[in-house]
Amino acid sequence: MKKIFLVLLLLVSVQYAGAVCSGFSIGKSEKLGNQILKTKDKLSIYTANGIELTMRRVQKDFIAGKPSYYDIWQLWESFAVEHGKRVTKIVRGGEWETAIRLKQDFVGGSLHGFEKKTSVEFMLDGKRLDEAADVPLTPFKKMVVKQYSDLYQLNSETEKIATIIKIWEIGEQNEITIKQEIKWLTEQNVVAAYMTMIPVVRQENGVLVTSKASRDDVAGIVDVSQEGHVNDLGARNKNSTSKKLKIWGEHYGIAIHVDRGKNLPNGSLWVSNAKMYNKVYLDYCGNHVVKAGEIFSITSLISFLVYQ
């Protein structure tokens, strides 16, 4: 009887080990928890369900007439990771937080320039990290990055037009919260204020990463599997009050939930049909004349989905 029991116990143990170790699974990843890896100008955040988010510090001196004069930290890319290796790009390199289109042209971030941090703070499980600190692969429960920056008029390194606060919070729920506040110092003709953008991959190396999408004000699921897709989630059907948008494929997805400080009539949440991505845009205001002292405030919760 004891021999039979031991054999059964051994068989159960082998089956359990096989279930845990056979490829990438959410259960296995959740046991690992969140981890970070940091250098003086790069930060990788690994979520519990096997997604890597990258942040980077970028800087460039002023060059008249070109997108330039920036020194900031920013979110940049995202990958699915299996057994410590990147296997699929989920989000292409690009601005996630700040691209303000004024009447003249865009400003903000590294792609459009004229934004410079005044301070940045890293908090790992309540302990402050130096900006230039190197951190080996380390588990964590909560990571917070808080950055103050100034926004300048197009082609100027002296004419300040706004101050910006950005707070990135990463907890244990396979998601990141981005809080932003822009305080305008001068009156500006704003065409669009993209305060949340996600350059989500549609296809990468022949693999269809995202093919379906939904939004809380639109009935049903729409097809976003081909470039040029036309549907109720596109630029032609913008909605100033919609709060939730989800985009996904067979294995991965991203869900966004936005909380605006106020709903301006020309704001919108929509998906681009460009060739290179299914880019999600949150335009805070659309066409809007901001007054000195006016504040834009938004919180975006971005969840990373992995399907077995």
Image (cartoon, rainbow, N blue to C red):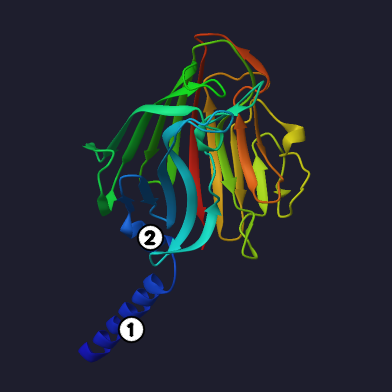
In the picture of the structure, the residue carrying the numbered disc 1 is 11
Whole-number angstrom distance, CA of label 1 to CA of label 2: 24 Å
In the picture of the structure, the residue carrying the numbered disc 2 is 29
Residue at 32% over, 52% down: 35
Which quadrant is the N terminus positioned in?
bottom left
Please provide percent x and percent y for residue 89: 53, 57
Left or right: 305 in relation to 3:
right
Give the class, few, some or many, for how many residues have Cα within 10 Å of label 2's Cα (few <14, many ≥20).
Answer: some
Residue at 63% over, 44% down: 279
- Secondary structure found at label 2: helix
- Secondary structure found at label 1: helix
Give the class, few, some or many, for how many residues have Cα within 10 Å of label 1's Cα (few <14, many ≥20).
Answer: few
89 or 160, nearer to the observer:
160
Residue at 44% over, 39% down: 74
Looking at the image, tell me whether mark 1 or mark 2 is earlier in sequence order. Answer: 1
Q: Label 2 is placed on what type of residue?
A: Ser
* Residue that sits furthest to the front in the current view: 64
26 or 68, nearer to the observer:
68
Vertical side of 230 occupied by 106: above or below:
above
Please provide percent x and percent y for residue 171: 36, 42
Residue 211, disc: none
Vertical side of 23 occupied by 37: above or below:
above
188 or 29, nearer to the observer:
188
Quarter of the view holding residue 7:
bottom left
Vertical side of 208 occupied by 169: above or below:
above
Q: Label 1 is placed on what type of residue?
A: Leu
